[in-house]
Amino acid sequence: MTGHDTGTPFAPHTPEETAAMLDAIGAESVEDLFDVPEPVRFDGEFGIEAHDEQAVRAEFSADLDRTDDLVEFLGRGHYDHYIPSAVEHLADRSEFLTSYTQYQPEVAQGFLQALFEYQSIVVELTGLDVANCSLYDAATALGEAALLAKRVRATDGDVILVPELLRAERRSVLENYVAGTALSVESYAHDDGAADVDAIRERIDADVTMVYAESPTVRGTLDPNLAAIGDLAEEHDALFTLGSDPIALSVLERPALLGADVVVGDASVLGLPASYGTGLGLFATRDEFLRQVPGRLVGASEDADGNRAYTLTLQTREQHIRKERATSNVCTNQAWVALRAAMHAVSLGPEGLVELAQTCIEAPASLASDVDDLSGYSAPVHGRPQFREFLVETDASASAIGDGLREEGFAVHVLDDDRLQLCVTDTNREHAGELVDALEVVR
């Protein structure tokens, strides 16, 4: 080996080179470059006793056997829909599972075309001009939208307006995204589960660079005020960003017609079961912001023989262009997840997608009606059309009811002292009657 091979394969520095670099930056050791609290520093021992494969399997099986077998009526951003078996089988092909980012178009035409079709589906559903290959989830897509708004807004502004109903986790990610910039996040009130347009009107001024609204909201309500919000945003030269998802968008009015400049959300409602973690960030915007879109875009072109060909036409992250021109440092390989979403959408087709969306409207309406007929319950709390989920007001302790439902084999959200939230889709609606019976038992 040469002198340069005495370090690790990933940082091949000799002791002399390391010493020279430390001297140049005024540090005494490599450890000085890291601020790792002592309690979490690796001391050379994992403290995990070694086991053979059979023992590991037995231990995991024992742990899993202790897991509650509950029928979930959970939602609030994580939704379960039936995934056709064709999606599972096709997506499990080795060329998809082992594929990384499709940098080399000459060997990745099939995957690139699939991603192009995914983008096309998003464009069709939103009515906007451009969609990227995907981000991590809805929260990171919202964060990227805020940064885009700051870059493209014509006048100065540093306030991002979001609904007070915005999930705390999603707001936390947004605030992390804007930390270190001049941007700040403020909330506006809701009115019966939808945006309070008057509250937005009173707050919005030249300081606001982006207004964010959701439909469906985290409570499942469909917001009828989106066009009015879009008008207010346009009047004050702020970007209007709408949060939604592909299933809901198949029956709702296209965001572009409502004045939306950006649409974000989680596209994993197609192609993935509820995982309470892994997502698929949806991001679409207008053509004028094409070069401001984070991540990567797949485009269609022609090869040397004039045949249609696909390639990564725009990569605006710092790895690919000069850092000062990068729009984002997002490094996501959500290609396989986007592939699954596209496969699911295509397998359903336009009519099947609309039918699924109608189920997400009819099933919660039916369940809410049955719950409302029970003594001690009132549903839905909000007098608006609901999508997938709705709130239930209880006369007794909501926490006690939630515990009772768990004993009966059901998992629901307990929001506060007297409110529950129920989510019903095509995968759990067959158990809706059993849930109603359980609610009557535990009240």
Image (tube, helix red, strand yellow):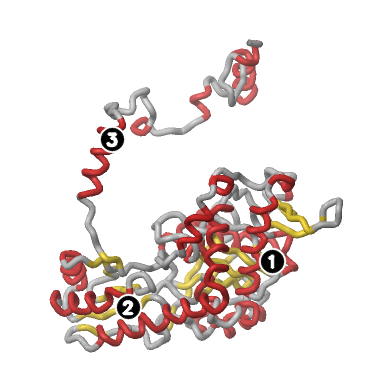
Q: Residues within 10 Å of mark 3 (few under 14, many from 20)?
A: few
Q: Amino acid at mark 1?
A: Val
In three-dimensional space, the C-alpha distance between marks 2 and 3, rounded to whole angstroms, equals 42 Å
Q: Which mark sits nearer the N-terminus, 3 or 1?
A: 3
The residue identified by callout 3 is 56
- Badges 3 and 1: C-beta atoms under 8 Å apart? no
Mark 3: amino acid: Val
Q: Which residue is mark 1?
A: 130
User: Which quarter of the figure has residue 425?
Assistant: bottom left
Residue 356 % position (x, y):
46, 76
Mark 2 and mark 3 lie on one chain; the one further toward the N terminus is: 3
Is residue 285 placed above or below 5 in the rendered structure?
below
Instruction: Examine the rendered structure and indicate whether residue 347 appears above or below residue 433.
Output: above
Residue 141, percent across and down? 56, 60
Q: Position of residue 437 (x, y in %)?
A: 18, 78
Secondary structure under tag 2 reads strand
Residue 206 visible in the current orientation: no
